[in-house]
Every structure is written in structure tokens, then in C-alpha cells.
Image: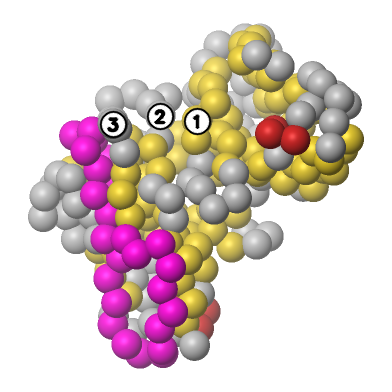
Amino acid sequence: EAQVTQNPRYLITVTGKKLTVTCSQNMNHEYMSWYRQDPGLGLRQIYYSMNVEVTDKGDVPEGYKVSRKEKRNFPLILESPSPNQTSLYFCASRRTGHSNTEAFFGQGTRLTVV
Amino acid sequence: TQLLEQSPQFLSIQEGENLTVYCNSSSVFSSLQWYRQEPGEGPVLLVTVVTGGEVKKLKRLTFQFGDARKDSSLHITAAQPGDTGLYLCASVSGSNYKLTFGKGTLLTVNP
């Protein structure tokens, strides 16, 4: 079954404690991205990767890091989380090549930073 | 980055009613996608429209792409509680294949 798997689904942490949210896809997609979803602001792209070892900033990259060492994995790293990073996070993957490929999303990670 | 404006932001209706939600931009879309997001889940693709004037149907859902490819609409006939969710339009722009989303229409269909 084609899927994007995120872990964990829920996470409560304290300010400053480094954390990683994992994302894995089994569709051999080149393109992967991270979004955060906040009430009234919609889905905003944090970082994206067009292929292995190729990553770039999205619209709201401050406070986040990513890596793409393998095609299937795209972890999101918060080196020093702050309360304003409390949000619902989604990982997504797509084929590239033309503009109307379907984006597949993980089930989301609800992060609370206290 | 292409800005997508969706309206209305919220919509609460009774089962059996019809409704239309809209997605507009000041720029021309190369293509437009509609996603539905149910509570606690990630968005799932409903349809992609590519050609100006295109109409696509998915059971009780009808999607229309404007002739000038700057707007799109989603019409639901005889809404059911299972249609409840956040409806998002999205478009790809730029050489980096960035997928930009509108803020969505939150639909609640009451039994």
C-alpha cells in the first residue's frame, strides 16, 4: 500500500529539548516536503527536498532543519523547540516531472511545546 | 508564490442541502487540485483540473475550472455528514514544484 508514515503522532515536549519527527515514503518519490498547519494560517511549507541530498527552505523554515540522506526518508529536526512551534505537522511526497502530480500526506504529528 | 483565496472559510449546513465553495487567484493556474482533509488525518487528493472550462464529477461532487484558469469551484449535491471536512485547493508554481494551498473551507454537514 502506498503510504507516507510519520512518527510520532503526538508529542509533548519542553522548550529547548531537541526532537526529531520522522517521515518515510514507500513510493520512490523524488519530492518530499514538510508543512505546518495552524488555525487561520492554513498549510505552510517549512522545507522541501527535490531529491537525495537536495533540500531547500520553504515559507517558514526558521527553527527547523531537515536532511535527505536516503530517498525514502525526510526527517524534520527541531534543535531547540519553542512554544511558537506548537502546531500540527505534515510530511508529504510527490513525483516530480510535471505540475499536477498527486501529493500524498502522512497522518500528521501534533506537537506541543511547553 | 501564487496566493489562493478560498471562500467561504466556514460552512455549516443540513444534510441534503447543496453547496458551492470557491478558490480564486489573481494569477493563472497551470493546474489546480482539490483535497479533502478529515479530522485527525492528512489531506487526500479529490481531483486535478488542468484545462480552462473543464468540469469533473466525482459522485455528488462537481469540480469546475474557470475558462481563464484563475478560479475554480466545488459543488456538492445533497450533502451528507460524511462530506464533513476541510476542503483545500492547491496549485503548483515555480521550477521547484512548490505546492501552495489555500486556507480551506471547513464544511460541517449536520444530520
State yes or no: discs 1 and 2 in contact (Cβ < 8 Å).
Answer: yes
State yes or no: discs 3 and 1 in contact (Cβ < 8 Å).
Answer: no
Indicate the amino acid at tag 3: Glu
Judging by the rendered image, the residue that carries numbered circle 1 is B45
Residue B90: quarter of image: top right
Name the quadrant of the N terminus of chain A.
top left
Indicate the amino acid at tag 2: Glu
> Would you say residue B17 sits in the magenta stretch?
no
In the image, B67: left or right of A95? right
Comparing labels 3 and 2, the label whose residue is closer to the camera:
3
Residue B53: quarter of image: top right
Image location of residue B25, percent across then percent down: 66, 35
Judging by the rendered image, the residue that carries numbered circle 2 is A102
* Badge 3: chain ID: A
What distance separates the C-alpha of mark 1 from that of mark 2? 7 Å
Q: Is residue A25 above or below residue A77?
A: above
What distance separates the C-alpha of mark 3 from that of mark 2? 15 Å
The residue located at (50%, 30%) in the rendering is B45
Image location of residue B93, percent across then percent down: 45, 36
Q: Nearer the viewer, residue B54 or B109?
A: B109
Provide the secondary structure element on which disc 3 rests: loop
Residue span colored magenta: A7-33
Q: Is residue A17 above or below residue A87?
A: below
The residue located at (71%, 25%) in the rendering is B74
Judging by the rendered image, the residue that carries numbered circle 3 is A1
Image location of residue A113, percent across then percent down: 47, 82
Indicate the amino acid at tag 1: Leu
- For label 2, count other residues whose C-alpha is less than 10 Å away and answer few (under 14), some (14-19) or many (20+): some
- For label 1, count other residues whose C-alpha is less than 10 Å away and answer few (under 14), some (14-19) or many (20+): many
